[in-house]
Amino acid sequence: MNVSYTRNQKFFSEKRMDGGVASRQIIETYQSIRQQSINLTAPLSVEDMAVQSMPQTSPVKWYLAHNTWFFEKFLLARFVRDYLPFHPAFNLLFSNGAAANLPPEKRSIVTRPSLSVVRTYCAHVDNAVLALLKNMPDEAFPVLELGLQKELRNQERMLCDIKHLFGSNPFHPAYISKPVAPAEKTAGLKMLELRGGMAEVGHPGSTFCFGNELPKHRIFLNPFAIADRKITNAEYLAFVNAGGYKETKWWLEEGVAWRRNEQVNAPLYWRRIDDAWFEYTLYGLMPLDPNRPVCHISYFEADAFARFSGARLPTEFEWEFAANSIIPALPGVSVLNDTDTMKPAPGMSLHPLGASTENGLKQFFTDAWEWSSSSYAAYPGVKLNSDSVSENHELQMVDQYVLRGGSAVTPDGHSRITYRNFATAPTRHQFTGIRLARSIY
Protein backbone atom coordinates (compact mmCIF):
# COMPACT_ATOMS: atom_id res chain seq x y z
CA MET A 1 0.00 0.00 0.00
CA ASN A 2 1.45 3.35 -1.09
CA VAL A 3 0.44 5.13 2.12
CA SER A 4 2.30 5.99 5.29
CA TYR A 5 1.13 7.22 8.69
CA THR A 6 2.22 10.72 9.58
CA ARG A 7 2.25 13.00 12.61
CA ASN A 8 2.30 16.71 13.27
CA GLN A 9 5.85 17.94 13.24
CA LYS A 10 7.92 21.06 12.91
CA PHE A 11 8.23 21.39 9.16
CA PHE A 12 11.86 20.58 8.37
CA SER A 13 13.70 21.75 11.47
CA GLU A 14 13.96 18.29 13.00
CA LYS A 15 15.87 17.06 9.98
CA ARG A 16 18.59 19.69 10.10
CA MET A 17 21.80 19.82 12.05
CA ASP A 18 23.56 22.75 13.69
CA GLY A 19 24.69 25.49 11.35
CA GLY A 20 21.90 24.94 8.84
CA VAL A 21 23.47 21.85 7.34
CA ALA A 22 20.93 19.44 5.87
CA SER A 23 20.85 16.06 7.51
CA ARG A 24 22.04 12.96 5.73
CA GLN A 25 18.40 11.88 5.54
CA ILE A 26 17.45 14.85 3.36
CA ILE A 27 20.49 14.38 1.14
CA GLU A 28 19.80 10.69 0.69
CA THR A 29 16.13 11.34 -0.05
CA TYR A 30 17.02 13.88 -2.74
CA GLN A 31 19.56 11.54 -4.31
CA SER A 32 17.21 8.54 -4.13
CA ILE A 33 14.29 10.25 -5.87
CA ARG A 34 16.49 11.83 -8.53
CA GLN A 35 18.25 8.52 -9.18
CA GLN A 36 14.95 6.70 -9.49
CA SER A 37 14.03 8.90 -12.47
CA ILE A 38 17.28 7.84 -14.11
CA ASN A 39 16.69 4.20 -13.19
CA LEU A 40 13.32 4.24 -14.96
CA THR A 41 15.13 5.01 -18.21
CA ALA A 42 17.47 1.98 -17.96
CA PRO A 43 15.36 -0.30 -20.23
CA LEU A 44 14.96 2.44 -22.86
CA SER A 45 16.91 3.25 -25.99
CA VAL A 46 17.86 6.76 -27.02
CA GLU A 47 15.09 6.59 -29.62
CA ASP A 48 12.52 5.54 -27.00
CA MET A 49 13.27 8.63 -24.95
CA ALA A 50 12.98 11.17 -27.76
CA VAL A 51 9.41 10.71 -28.98
CA GLN A 52 5.85 11.12 -27.75
CA SER A 53 3.06 8.86 -28.98
CA MET A 54 0.25 11.41 -28.75
CA PRO A 55 -0.24 15.06 -27.73
CA GLN A 56 -1.22 14.11 -24.16
CA THR A 57 2.12 12.41 -23.49
CA SER A 58 5.69 13.73 -23.31
CA PRO A 59 9.11 12.33 -24.26
CA VAL A 60 11.08 10.77 -21.41
CA LYS A 61 13.97 13.09 -22.26
CA TRP A 62 11.69 16.06 -21.64
CA TYR A 63 10.66 14.70 -18.22
CA LEU A 64 14.30 14.36 -17.14
CA ALA A 65 15.06 17.91 -18.21
CA HIS A 66 11.81 19.34 -16.81
CA ASN A 67 12.35 17.80 -13.36
CA THR A 68 15.84 19.26 -13.36
CA TRP A 69 14.65 22.64 -14.61
CA PHE A 70 12.43 23.03 -11.55
CA PHE A 71 15.35 22.71 -9.14
CA GLU A 72 17.49 25.06 -11.21
CA LYS A 73 14.78 27.68 -11.70
CA PHE A 74 13.18 27.78 -8.26
CA LEU A 75 15.94 26.55 -5.94
CA LEU A 76 19.34 27.37 -7.37
CA ALA A 77 18.45 30.63 -9.12
CA ARG A 78 16.76 31.88 -5.96
CA PHE A 79 19.09 30.70 -3.24
CA VAL A 80 22.57 30.54 -4.81
CA ARG A 81 24.23 33.90 -5.24
CA ASP A 82 25.29 34.69 -8.81
CA TYR A 83 24.12 31.30 -10.06
CA LEU A 84 24.49 30.95 -13.83
CA PRO A 85 21.94 28.70 -15.59
CA PHE A 86 23.33 25.68 -17.39
CA HIS A 87 21.84 27.03 -20.64
CA PRO A 88 19.55 30.09 -20.93
CA ALA A 89 17.31 28.41 -23.54
CA PHE A 90 16.40 25.56 -21.19
CA ASN A 91 14.01 27.85 -19.31
CA LEU A 92 11.94 28.07 -22.50
CA LEU A 93 12.29 24.46 -23.62
CA PHE A 94 11.68 22.59 -20.38
CA SER A 95 9.29 24.74 -18.38
CA ASN A 96 5.57 24.10 -18.53
CA GLY A 97 2.38 26.11 -18.34
CA ALA A 98 2.26 29.71 -19.51
CA ALA A 99 6.06 30.09 -19.29
CA ALA A 100 6.72 27.35 -21.83
CA ASN A 101 7.90 28.41 -25.28
CA LEU A 102 6.93 25.08 -26.83
CA PRO A 103 3.41 23.58 -26.98
CA PRO A 104 3.23 20.26 -25.10
CA GLU A 105 2.22 18.35 -28.24
CA LYS A 106 5.46 19.41 -29.96
CA ARG A 107 7.95 18.39 -27.30
CA SER A 108 9.27 15.52 -29.40
CA ILE A 109 10.55 17.87 -32.11
CA VAL A 110 13.27 19.04 -29.72
CA THR A 111 16.00 16.68 -30.86
CA ARG A 112 18.58 19.14 -29.55
CA PRO A 113 19.82 19.27 -26.86
CA SER A 114 20.75 15.63 -27.14
CA LEU A 115 20.08 13.06 -24.45
CA SER A 116 23.72 13.16 -23.39
CA VAL A 117 23.51 16.92 -22.88
CA VAL A 118 20.32 16.50 -20.84
CA ARG A 119 22.05 13.92 -18.66
CA THR A 120 24.94 16.37 -18.16
CA TYR A 121 22.39 19.03 -17.23
CA CYS A 122 20.87 16.71 -14.62
CA ALA A 123 24.26 15.97 -13.07
CA HIS A 124 25.23 19.66 -13.10
CA VAL A 125 22.09 20.71 -11.23
CA ASP A 126 22.30 17.79 -8.79
CA ASN A 127 25.84 18.76 -7.83
CA ALA A 128 24.76 22.36 -7.30
CA VAL A 129 21.76 21.34 -5.16
CA LEU A 130 23.90 19.05 -3.01
CA ALA A 131 26.32 21.92 -2.48
CA LEU A 132 23.44 24.21 -1.53
CA LEU A 133 22.16 21.67 0.99
CA LYS A 134 25.32 22.22 3.02
CA ASN A 135 24.00 25.64 4.00
CA MET A 136 20.44 26.12 2.77
CA PRO A 137 18.09 28.71 4.30
CA ASP A 138 14.85 27.57 5.92
CA GLU A 139 12.67 29.11 3.23
CA ALA A 140 14.32 26.92 0.59
CA PHE A 141 13.27 23.60 2.13
CA PRO A 142 9.59 23.81 1.11
CA VAL A 143 10.75 24.46 -2.45
CA LEU A 144 12.95 21.39 -2.32
CA GLU A 145 10.02 19.37 -0.98
CA LEU A 146 7.71 20.57 -3.75
CA GLY A 147 10.28 19.73 -6.40
CA LEU A 148 10.70 16.19 -5.08
CA GLN A 149 6.94 15.65 -4.91
CA LYS A 150 6.57 16.86 -8.48
CA GLU A 151 9.32 14.50 -9.59
CA LEU A 152 7.56 11.57 -7.94
CA ARG A 153 4.37 12.51 -9.76
CA ASN A 154 6.30 12.75 -13.03
CA GLN A 155 7.81 9.30 -12.50
CA GLU A 156 4.29 7.90 -12.69
CA ARG A 157 3.57 9.98 -15.78
CA MET A 158 6.77 8.75 -17.40
CA LEU A 159 5.67 5.14 -17.00
CA CYS A 160 2.18 5.89 -18.32
CA ASP A 161 3.70 7.58 -21.37
CA ILE A 162 6.24 4.81 -21.94
CA LYS A 163 3.44 2.26 -21.82
CA HIS A 164 1.42 4.22 -24.37
CA LEU A 165 4.44 4.51 -26.64
CA PHE A 166 5.22 0.79 -26.49
CA GLY A 167 1.55 -0.17 -26.53
CA SER A 168 1.13 1.72 -29.80
CA ASN A 169 3.83 -0.45 -31.38
CA PRO A 170 2.36 -3.42 -33.33
CA PHE A 171 5.18 -5.62 -32.02
CA HIS A 172 4.16 -4.97 -28.38
CA PRO A 173 7.68 -4.57 -26.96
CA ALA A 174 8.12 -5.15 -23.24
CA TYR A 175 9.48 -2.39 -21.02
CA ILE A 176 10.76 -5.13 -18.69
CA SER A 177 10.84 -8.79 -19.71
CA LYS A 178 9.66 -10.73 -16.70
CA PRO A 179 7.21 -13.62 -16.23
CA VAL A 180 4.06 -12.59 -14.37
CA ALA A 181 2.12 -15.16 -12.33
CA PRO A 182 -1.68 -15.18 -12.57
CA ALA A 183 -3.53 -13.18 -9.93
CA GLU A 184 -5.31 -14.96 -7.09
CA LYS A 185 -8.97 -15.74 -7.62
CA THR A 186 -11.07 -12.72 -6.70
CA ALA A 187 -14.01 -13.09 -4.33
CA GLY A 188 -17.45 -11.92 -5.40
CA LEU A 189 -18.11 -8.19 -5.31
CA LYS A 190 -19.79 -6.89 -2.15
CA MET A 191 -21.50 -3.53 -1.68
CA LEU A 192 -20.88 -2.26 1.84
CA GLU A 193 -23.22 0.32 3.35
CA LEU A 194 -21.93 3.45 5.09
CA ARG A 195 -24.12 5.79 7.13
CA GLY A 196 -22.59 9.04 5.90
CA GLY A 197 -23.45 12.17 7.88
CA MET A 198 -21.17 15.11 8.63
CA ALA A 199 -17.57 14.48 7.62
CA GLU A 200 -14.31 16.34 7.22
CA VAL A 201 -12.55 16.15 3.88
CA GLY A 202 -9.34 17.67 2.56
CA HIS A 203 -5.83 17.90 3.94
CA PRO A 204 -5.17 19.56 7.32
CA GLY A 205 -2.01 21.21 5.98
CA SER A 206 0.24 19.90 8.74
CA THR A 207 2.51 18.12 6.25
CA PHE A 208 3.04 18.35 2.51
CA CYS A 209 0.10 18.40 0.14
CA PHE A 210 -0.73 19.98 -3.19
CA GLY A 211 -2.87 23.10 -3.17
CA ASN A 212 -5.90 21.33 -4.62
CA GLU A 213 -6.21 19.28 -1.40
CA LEU A 214 -6.81 22.41 0.69
CA PRO A 215 -8.54 23.57 2.80
CA LYS A 216 -9.92 20.89 5.07
CA HIS A 217 -13.64 21.46 5.37
CA ARG A 218 -16.90 19.85 6.44
CA ILE A 219 -19.44 18.25 4.13
CA PHE A 220 -22.61 16.20 4.55
CA LEU A 221 -23.03 12.77 2.96
CA ASN A 222 -26.26 10.86 2.56
CA PRO A 223 -26.07 7.12 3.31
CA PHE A 224 -24.47 5.18 0.47
CA ALA A 225 -23.04 1.80 -0.45
CA ILE A 226 -19.61 1.33 -1.99
CA ALA A 227 -17.92 -1.72 -3.50
CA ASP A 228 -15.38 -3.52 -1.37
CA ARG A 229 -12.91 -3.65 -4.28
CA LYS A 230 -12.27 -2.53 -7.85
CA ILE A 231 -13.99 -4.08 -10.87
CA THR A 232 -12.07 -6.99 -12.43
CA ASN A 233 -11.30 -7.79 -16.05
CA ALA A 234 -13.81 -10.66 -15.90
CA GLU A 235 -16.59 -8.37 -14.72
CA TYR A 236 -15.78 -5.80 -17.37
CA LEU A 237 -15.54 -8.50 -20.06
CA ALA A 238 -19.14 -9.44 -19.25
CA PHE A 239 -20.08 -5.86 -20.14
CA VAL A 240 -18.15 -6.13 -23.42
CA ASN A 241 -19.70 -9.52 -24.29
CA ALA A 242 -23.19 -8.19 -23.51
CA GLY A 243 -22.77 -5.56 -26.22
CA GLY A 244 -22.04 -2.79 -23.75
CA TYR A 245 -20.05 -0.79 -26.29
CA LYS A 246 -22.89 -0.97 -28.83
CA GLU A 247 -25.82 -0.19 -26.55
CA THR A 248 -26.15 3.59 -26.38
CA LYS A 249 -28.51 3.57 -23.38
CA TRP A 250 -25.57 3.06 -21.00
CA TRP A 251 -23.53 5.93 -22.39
CA LEU A 252 -23.42 9.67 -21.89
CA GLU A 253 -24.17 11.50 -25.16
CA GLU A 254 -20.63 12.81 -25.37
CA GLY A 255 -19.37 9.30 -24.62
CA VAL A 256 -21.36 7.89 -27.56
CA ALA A 257 -19.73 10.43 -29.89
CA TRP A 258 -16.28 9.72 -28.43
CA ARG A 259 -16.73 5.96 -28.77
CA ARG A 260 -17.78 6.27 -32.41
CA ASN A 261 -15.13 8.80 -33.39
CA GLU A 262 -12.32 6.86 -31.72
CA GLN A 263 -13.76 3.44 -32.71
CA VAL A 264 -13.47 2.18 -29.13
CA ASN A 265 -14.80 -1.30 -28.33
CA ALA A 266 -12.65 -2.37 -25.36
CA PRO A 267 -10.21 -0.96 -22.78
CA LEU A 268 -7.14 0.74 -24.23
CA TYR A 269 -4.67 -2.15 -24.04
CA TRP A 270 -6.99 -5.10 -24.66
CA ARG A 271 -6.18 -6.96 -27.88
CA ARG A 272 -8.43 -9.53 -29.58
CA ILE A 273 -6.24 -12.22 -31.17
CA ASP A 274 -7.67 -15.46 -32.63
CA ASP A 275 -10.90 -15.21 -30.63
CA ALA A 276 -9.04 -14.68 -27.34
CA TRP A 277 -8.44 -11.54 -25.34
CA PHE A 278 -4.94 -10.38 -24.47
CA GLU A 279 -3.71 -7.33 -22.59
CA TYR A 280 -0.63 -5.26 -23.30
CA THR A 281 1.36 -4.55 -20.14
CA LEU A 282 4.75 -3.09 -19.33
CA TYR A 283 5.86 -6.73 -19.18
CA GLY A 284 4.64 -7.26 -22.76
CA LEU A 285 1.53 -8.84 -24.24
CA MET A 286 -0.11 -11.49 -22.06
CA PRO A 287 -3.45 -13.31 -21.87
CA LEU A 288 -6.13 -11.22 -20.19
CA ASP A 289 -6.16 -12.16 -16.50
CA PRO A 290 -9.79 -12.31 -15.31
CA ASN A 291 -8.87 -11.62 -11.68
CA ARG A 292 -6.86 -8.45 -12.17
CA PRO A 293 -8.68 -5.12 -12.05
CA VAL A 294 -9.74 -3.58 -15.34
CA CYS A 295 -7.40 -0.72 -16.16
CA HIS A 296 -6.85 2.09 -18.67
CA ILE A 297 -10.46 3.02 -19.21
CA SER A 298 -11.99 6.45 -19.75
CA TYR A 299 -14.53 8.20 -17.58
CA PHE A 300 -17.07 7.47 -20.32
CA GLU A 301 -16.37 3.73 -20.07
CA ALA A 302 -16.40 3.73 -16.27
CA ASP A 303 -19.70 5.60 -16.17
CA ALA A 304 -21.28 3.31 -18.80
CA PHE A 305 -20.20 0.19 -16.91
CA ALA A 306 -21.63 1.59 -13.67
CA ARG A 307 -25.02 2.21 -15.36
CA PHE A 308 -24.92 -1.28 -16.89
CA SER A 309 -24.33 -2.65 -13.37
CA GLY A 310 -27.25 -0.77 -11.84
CA ALA A 311 -24.86 1.42 -9.90
CA ARG A 312 -22.90 4.65 -10.27
CA LEU A 313 -19.43 6.00 -9.66
CA PRO A 314 -18.74 7.31 -6.14
CA THR A 315 -18.29 11.00 -5.52
CA GLU A 316 -14.79 11.93 -4.47
CA PHE A 317 -16.06 12.69 -0.96
CA GLU A 318 -17.78 9.29 -0.67
CA TRP A 319 -14.47 7.73 -1.71
CA GLU A 320 -12.51 9.74 0.89
CA PHE A 321 -15.09 8.96 3.60
CA ALA A 322 -14.89 5.23 2.81
CA ALA A 323 -11.09 5.23 2.79
CA ASN A 324 -11.02 7.08 6.11
CA SER A 325 -13.38 4.51 7.60
CA ILE A 326 -10.68 1.86 7.35
CA ILE A 327 -7.51 3.97 7.54
CA PRO A 328 -8.29 6.91 9.86
CA ALA A 329 -6.15 10.03 10.24
CA LEU A 330 -3.95 9.44 7.25
CA PRO A 331 -3.31 12.82 5.60
CA GLY A 332 0.01 12.05 3.91
CA VAL A 333 3.72 12.19 4.50
CA SER A 334 6.52 14.62 3.75
CA VAL A 335 9.28 12.95 1.79
CA LEU A 336 11.83 14.99 3.70
CA ASN A 337 10.44 14.02 7.10
CA ASP A 338 10.20 10.25 6.83
CA THR A 339 12.74 8.66 4.53
CA ASP A 340 11.80 5.16 5.67
CA THR A 341 8.46 5.53 3.87
CA MET A 342 10.05 6.95 0.73
CA LYS A 343 11.01 3.98 -1.42
CA PRO A 344 10.18 4.89 -5.04
CA ALA A 345 11.30 1.72 -6.77
CA PRO A 346 10.13 -1.36 -4.81
CA GLY A 347 6.49 -0.25 -4.54
CA MET A 348 5.91 -0.06 -8.29
CA SER A 349 4.39 -3.34 -9.45
CA LEU A 350 4.06 -1.89 -13.01
CA HIS A 351 0.87 -3.91 -13.54
CA PRO A 352 -2.28 -4.25 -11.40
CA LEU A 353 -2.03 -7.16 -8.97
CA GLY A 354 -5.63 -7.68 -7.92
CA ALA A 355 -7.59 -7.50 -4.67
CA SER A 356 -6.57 -9.30 -1.51
CA THR A 357 -8.76 -12.04 -0.04
CA GLU A 358 -9.39 -10.01 3.14
CA ASN A 359 -12.94 -9.10 4.04
CA GLY A 360 -14.10 -5.50 4.04
CA LEU A 361 -13.08 -2.45 2.05
CA LYS A 362 -9.75 -2.80 0.30
CA GLN A 363 -7.62 -1.95 -2.73
CA PHE A 364 -7.96 1.82 -2.33
CA PHE A 365 -4.36 2.79 -3.05
CA THR A 366 -3.18 0.04 -5.38
CA ASP A 367 -3.47 -1.07 -8.99
CA ALA A 368 -5.45 1.77 -10.63
CA TRP A 369 -6.71 5.25 -9.88
CA GLU A 370 -10.47 5.24 -9.41
CA TRP A 371 -12.77 7.50 -11.37
CA SER A 372 -15.15 9.56 -9.24
CA SER A 373 -18.29 11.27 -10.51
CA SER A 374 -17.00 14.59 -9.15
CA SER A 375 -16.00 17.39 -11.47
CA TYR A 376 -12.57 18.78 -10.64
CA ALA A 377 -13.22 22.04 -8.79
CA ALA A 378 -11.68 24.13 -6.03
CA TYR A 379 -12.64 23.52 -2.41
CA PRO A 380 -14.62 26.25 -0.61
CA GLY A 381 -12.38 28.98 0.74
CA VAL A 382 -9.31 28.07 -1.29
CA LYS A 383 -6.82 30.90 -1.70
CA LEU A 384 -5.23 31.48 -5.10
CA ASN A 385 -1.46 31.37 -4.65
CA SER A 386 0.44 34.09 -6.50
CA ASP A 387 3.82 32.44 -5.85
CA SER A 388 5.25 31.33 -9.21
CA VAL A 389 6.68 28.21 -7.56
CA SER A 390 3.27 26.86 -6.61
CA GLU A 391 0.79 25.34 -9.00
CA ASN A 392 -2.45 27.24 -9.37
CA HIS A 393 -4.64 24.17 -9.74
CA GLU A 394 -7.71 26.40 -9.98
CA LEU A 395 -6.64 27.43 -13.48
CA GLN A 396 -6.86 23.79 -14.63
CA MET A 397 -10.28 23.12 -13.15
CA VAL A 398 -12.46 22.80 -16.23
CA ASP A 399 -13.84 19.76 -18.07
CA GLN A 400 -12.01 17.29 -15.82
CA TYR A 401 -13.01 14.65 -13.27
CA VAL A 402 -11.33 13.71 -10.00
CA LEU A 403 -9.44 10.43 -9.67
CA ARG A 404 -8.67 9.03 -6.23
CA GLY A 405 -6.29 6.43 -4.77
CA GLY A 406 -3.13 5.33 -6.53
CA SER A 407 -1.90 2.86 -9.11
CA ALA A 408 0.62 0.17 -9.97
CA VAL A 409 3.04 2.91 -11.06
CA THR A 410 2.53 5.35 -8.18
CA PRO A 411 5.79 5.67 -6.21
CA ASP A 412 5.61 4.51 -2.61
CA GLY A 413 4.81 7.36 -0.26
CA HIS A 414 3.14 9.49 -2.94
CA SER A 415 -0.44 8.34 -2.28
CA ARG A 416 -2.65 9.66 0.49
CA ILE A 417 -6.36 9.76 1.22
CA THR A 418 -6.71 13.43 0.30
CA TYR A 419 -4.70 13.25 -2.98
CA ARG A 420 -6.75 14.58 -5.92
CA ASN A 421 -5.58 13.34 -9.29
CA PHE A 422 -7.63 14.50 -12.27
CA ALA A 423 -8.16 13.86 -15.97
CA THR A 424 -10.46 14.65 -18.86
CA ALA A 425 -13.27 12.21 -19.59
CA PRO A 426 -11.59 10.58 -22.66
CA THR A 427 -8.29 9.92 -20.81
CA ARG A 428 -7.22 6.27 -20.88
CA HIS A 429 -3.42 6.16 -20.87
CA GLN A 430 -3.29 6.69 -17.11
CA PHE A 431 -3.78 3.61 -14.90
CA THR A 432 -7.52 4.19 -14.33
CA GLY A 433 -10.12 1.76 -12.99
CA ILE A 434 -13.59 1.47 -11.44
CA ARG A 435 -15.13 1.19 -7.98
CA LEU A 436 -18.93 1.16 -7.88
CA ALA A 437 -21.27 2.96 -5.51
CA ARG A 438 -25.03 3.16 -4.94
CA SER A 439 -27.27 5.62 -3.15
CA ILE A 440 -29.32 4.40 -0.18
CA TYR A 441 -32.76 5.93 0.20
Image (spheres, rainbow, N blue to C red):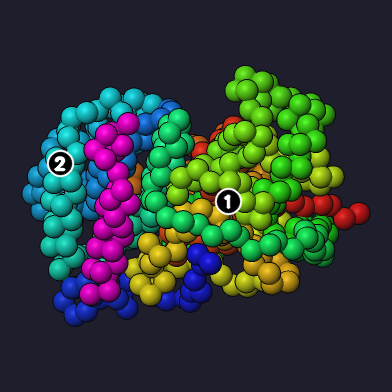
Question: Quick check: is 135 in the magenta stretch?
Answer: no
Q: Determine whether, in the image, residue 130 is placed left or right of residue 306.
A: left
The three-letter amino acid code for the residue at tag 1 is Trp
Q: Tell me which label, 2 or 1, sits earlier in the chain.
A: 2
Numbered circles on residues, count? 2
Q: Determine whether, in the image, residue 70 is placed left or right of residue 430.
A: left
Residue 230, percent from left and from top: 68, 55
Asked if residue 422 shows in the view, the reply is no
Residue that mark 1 sits on: 369
Task: Locate residue 297: give its quadrant.
Answer: top right
Q: Which span of residues is magenta-colored?
A: 24-51
Residue 77, percent from left and from top: 18, 48
Residue 131, percent from left and from top: 13, 62
Residue name at image x 67 percent, y 48 percent: 233
Above/below status of 10 relative to 387: below
Q: Residue furthest right?
A: 441
Residue name at image x 30 percent, y 44 percent: 44
Residue name at image x 15 percent, y 52 percent: 123
Q: Secondary structure at mark 2?
A: helix
Question: Quick check: is 40 in the magenta stretch?
Answer: yes
Q: Quadrant of the C terminus?
A: bottom right
Q: Secondary structure at mark 1?
A: strand
Viewer-proximal residue among 420 and 52: 52
Viewer-proximal residue among 256 and 349: 349
Kindly report which numbered mark, 2 or 1, lies closer to the viewer in this rendering: 2
Above/below status of 214 relative to 424: below
The three-letter amino acid code for the residue at tag 2 is Ser
Residue name at image x 29 percent, y 38 percent: 49
Residue 221, percent from left and from top: 77, 57
Provide the major secondary structure of the magenta segment: helix
